[in-house]
């Protein structure tokens, strides 16, 4: 891939180009995310598998010990707001939207901000990040003329030009107009090699559920009578030009409780879907089943599996592409495993004692694949964590492993090569520092004598430096700048600091402060504190044209908190704040806020907080726990009703993070921070702005709706806005994103301005 992966419908698992105005969202199961590159084998993030097509290899879990049922909650008077498209619920939404827009659009900068933000999002000077396959570099692009976007490709020679010539493959705007459907691009999976066939996934309004259609790159048309799936949260994987593996909604019992595929089938061209052959089944309680085909010449294998929870997998591997007679892989349940040619790489989330050695969680191990599958456990560590350094990601060239490392929340990169005697050598990749660095290999194993076999790209960005895209090779120590994003604001006189707050239990919690020009620590700075703190997702530095023009340039301070629950310091940092310890995320966030007040960066009158999805839960929880600390809360596509989260849409897949509210001991913990159950009448809360999307089929919009309704019933002032499209990204095109950003900015200045 050229540059970081495109947003994978988290949207914004923070990558190098992430704009904080697109909230960090509750992740999808790892195996459903866009891979880093066409050459990065997705097995590293996939769930596990069975030795037979019919059932998973592990025995069914034992029945839990009998326990007292969870005490019944008082009847919820707002369950009707969970009827997503119901007339009564949509009437309520439209009424609240109108009332909120009237207040926020009255801010004198609203219209100018919306126009400017859309110009930034549409700017033709943006870096067109692309994925390499064969001789082509594929890109999906939105701008003012193409709000729903173009899927296009070009050659590397053209890509290097300031204004490449692109071959348009699919115009989503034209398709939507022709079919009278509000199509939103999701992704494409191409077979590669000499084939021209792809599977294109499109959603209605930006939802996770997609329609899948076969597409021919040669004719630039959908294939008549080709592979096609109706709207569902599907998994598709090419086996060959006439066969695919598919997991989708085959009917009752074919999905997990989380709404993802439970059954994987092998589907031949021309065969009715109902006649496709079942090759693997997971369990209803799993997050999802999966399949991955590795067609690297000479190393062909197919992997099936299941993900019992969000962070664990079981896998089995077949030494043929058809997936016959797979062999169960013995590994720690929460370890991620990837095959690379004749090697296997294992990323640990727990300490592992094996073969006379103990490998700490957060390590990246490598071994001979054939020996590993036979039971040998002889490893070399390509990465071992320290208190300040953690593994971010890795990818491959033909002969080397490229490792991205977080060093005190700043990126570094290493290249590891195997010597003739089997030992490994490390070389640091020279790159800008400190900021967010992402290095990714470009090798396509299907290309004979690949000229890009040892090539890689690197992206760099920090809070005051726009994104740049560089290209390098493991055979050279130099990086060539290919493209860069223009500066959207004057950063002269601005500065960034990394500070540390002390949490309730004594843990040092880092945070970044972005100071505007001329700001002083006098307690009067309008300040926005942003956080996420979940699912091992780190908050790395990013560059935001919207914040630069709408916030920093007007005197606003930005603070980004690296709280526990995130991935800044590896799996231990995440695991310190899950389930029974989830409150530690909120304690950390509160500690940062208190430190900002104590050091006079700001004061409660001028301090606001923002977070999306799991971050929406974060800001909702701290708002109810410490309302006196804040004067503004931007709560985006949030989880808020933690009694019912596991019953709504994909919520069951997140119980490994939060616990199970149907279990009394778990609910005893969750009930203490669930915002919907802790907001009270008679308390002075900051007047929140709650934002969601009707088409969000990951985090149910009922969370946001019910919280707003309850707060209003209790007499609290609330602003509520629900975009009718947009999915979990809260926007289906650049205008919708710019509009939402302008609404948020108006709210922040109304609440926090001097």
Image: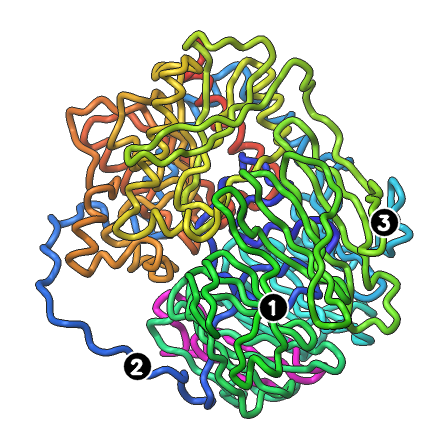
**Residue 501 versus residue 12 in the image, above or below:** above
Question: What separation in Å lies between label 2 and label 1 (alpha carbons)?
Answer: 31 Å
Q: Nearer the viewer, residue 352 or 750?
A: 352
Q: Which of 608 and 714 is in front in this view?
A: 608
- Expressed as whole percent of the image width and height from the top left, the position of residue 160 reads 87, 47
Answer few, some or many: residues within 10 Å of disc 1's Cα (few below 14, many 20 plus, some between 14 and 19): many
Q: Is 427 placed left or right of 304 in the picture?
A: right
Q: Quadrant of residue 488?
A: top right
- Expressed as whole percent of the image width and height from the top left, the position of residue 463 reads 61, 29
Q: Do the residues labelled 1 and 3 touch (CB within 8 Å)?
A: no
Location of mark 2 (residue):
60
Answer few, some or many: residues within 10 Å of disc 3's Cα (few below 14, many 20 plus, some between 14 and 19): many
Q: Give the range drawn in magenta.
A: 238-267
The answer to whether residue 254 is magenta is: yes
First reached walking from the N terminus: tag 2 or tag 1? 2
Q: What element carries label 3?
A: helix
First reached walking from the N terminus: tag 1 or tag 3? 3
Q: Are marks 2 and 1 in contact (CB under 8 Å)?
A: no
Q: Is 564 placed left or right of 211 in the picture?
A: left
Location of mark 3 (residue):
159
Mark in front: 1 vs 3: 1
- Expressed as whole percent of the image width and height from the top left, the position of residue 456 reads 77, 54
The answer to whether residue 659 is magenta is: no
Tell me the quarter of the image containing the C terminus.
top left
Residue sitting at x 53%, y 87%:
326
Q: Is mark 1 on a helix, strand or loop?
A: strand
**Residue 2 versus residue 278 in the image, above or below:** above
Location of mark 1 (residue):
366
First reached walking from the N terminus: tag 2 or tag 3? 2
Q: Which of 246 and 30 is in front in this view?
A: 30
């Amino acid at each position: 891939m050229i540059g970081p992966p495109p947003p994978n419908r988290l949207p914004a698992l923070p990558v190098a180009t992430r704009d904080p105005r697109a909230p960090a969202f509750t992740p999808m199961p790892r195996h459903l995310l866009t891979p880093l590159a066409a050459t990065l084998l997705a097995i590293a993030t996939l769930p596990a598998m069975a030795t037979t097509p019919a059932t998973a290899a592990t025995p069914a879990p034992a029945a839990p010990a009998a326990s007292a049922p969870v005490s019944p909650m008082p009847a919820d008077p707002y369950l009707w707001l969970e009827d997503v498209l119901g007339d009564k619920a949509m009437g309520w939404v439209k009424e609240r939207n109108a009332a909120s827009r009237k207040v926020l659009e009255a801010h004198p900068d609203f219209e100018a901000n919306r126009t400017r933000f859309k110009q930034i999002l549409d700017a033709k000077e943006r870096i067109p990040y692309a994925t390499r396959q064969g001789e082509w570099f594929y890109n999906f692009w939105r701008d003012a003329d193409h709000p729903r976007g173009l899927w296009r490709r070009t050659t590397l020679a053209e890509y290097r030009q300031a204004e490449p010539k692109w071959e348009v493959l699919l115009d989503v705007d034209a398709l939507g107009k022709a079919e009278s459907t509000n199509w939103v691009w999701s992704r494409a999976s191409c077979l590669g090699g000499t084939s021209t066939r792809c599977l294109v996934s499109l959603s209605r309004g930006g939802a996770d559920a997609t329609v899948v259609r076969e597409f021919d790159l040669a004719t630039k048309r959908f294939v008549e009578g080709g592979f096609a799936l109706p709207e569902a949260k599907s998994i598709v994987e090419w086996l060959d030009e006439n066969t695919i593996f598919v997991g989708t909604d085959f009917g009752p019992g074919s999905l997990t409780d989380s709404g993802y595929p439970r059954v994987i089938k092998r589907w031949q061209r021309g065969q009715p879907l109902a006649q496709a052959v079942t090759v693997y089944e997971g369990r209803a309680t799993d997050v999802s089943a999966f399949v991955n085909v590795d067609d690297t010449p000479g190393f062909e294998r197919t992997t099936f599996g299941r993900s019992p929870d969000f962070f664990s997998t079981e896998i089995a591997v077949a030494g043929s592409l058809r997936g016959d007679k797979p062999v169960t892989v013995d590994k720690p349940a929460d370890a991620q495993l990837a095959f690379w040619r004749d090697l296997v790489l294992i990323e640990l989330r727990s300490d592992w004692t094996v073969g006379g050695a103990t490998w700490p969680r957060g390590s990246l191990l490598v071994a001979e694949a054939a020996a590993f599958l036979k039971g040998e456990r002889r490893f070399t560590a390509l990465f071992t964590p320290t208190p300040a350094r953690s593994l971010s990601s890795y990818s491959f060239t033909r002969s080397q492993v490229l490792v991205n490392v977080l060093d005190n929340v700043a990126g570094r990169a290493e290249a590891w090569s195997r010597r003739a005697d089997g030992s490994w050598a490390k070389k640091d990749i020279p790159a800008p520092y400190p900021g967010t660095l992402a290095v990714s290999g470009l090798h396509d194993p299907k290309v004979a004598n690949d000229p890009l076999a040892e090539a890689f790209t690197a992206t760099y960005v920090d809070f005051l430096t726009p994104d740049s895209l560089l290209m390098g090779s493991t055979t050279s120590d130099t990086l060539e700048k290919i493209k860069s994003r223009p500066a959207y604001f004057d950063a002269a006189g601005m500065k960034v600091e990394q500070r540390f707050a002390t949490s309730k239990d004594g843990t040092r919690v880092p945070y970044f402060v972005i100071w505007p020009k001329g700001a002083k620590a006098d307690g009067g700075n309008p300040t926005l504190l942003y956080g996420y703190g979940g699912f091992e997702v780190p908050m790395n530095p990013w560059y935001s044209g919207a914040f630069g023009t709408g916030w920093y340039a007007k005197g606003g301070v930005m603070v980004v908190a690296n709280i526990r629950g995130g991935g800044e310091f590896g799996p231990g940092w995440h695991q310190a704040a899950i389930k029974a310890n989830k409150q530690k995320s909120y304690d950390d966030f509160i500690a940062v806020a208190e430190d900002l007040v104590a050091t006079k960066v700001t004061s409660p009158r001028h301090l606001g907080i923002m977070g999306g999805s799991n971050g929406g839960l974060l800001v909702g929880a701290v708002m109810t726990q410490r309302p006196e600390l804040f004067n503004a809360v931007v709560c985006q596509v949030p989880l808020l009703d933690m009694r019912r989260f596991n019953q709504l849409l994909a919520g069951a897949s997140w119980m490994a993070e939060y616990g199970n509210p149907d279990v009394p001991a778990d609910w005893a913990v969750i009930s203490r921070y669930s915002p919907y159950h802790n907001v009270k009448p008679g308390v002075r809360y900051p007047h929140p702005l709650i934002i969601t999307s009707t088409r969000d089929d990951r985090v149910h919009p009922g969370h946001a709706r019910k919280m707003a309704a309850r707060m209003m019933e209790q007499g609290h002032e609330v602003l509520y806005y629900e975009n009718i499209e947009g999915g979990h990204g809260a926007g289906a095109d650049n205008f919708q994103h710019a509009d939402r950003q302008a609404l948020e900015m108006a709210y922040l200045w109304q609440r926090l301005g001097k």
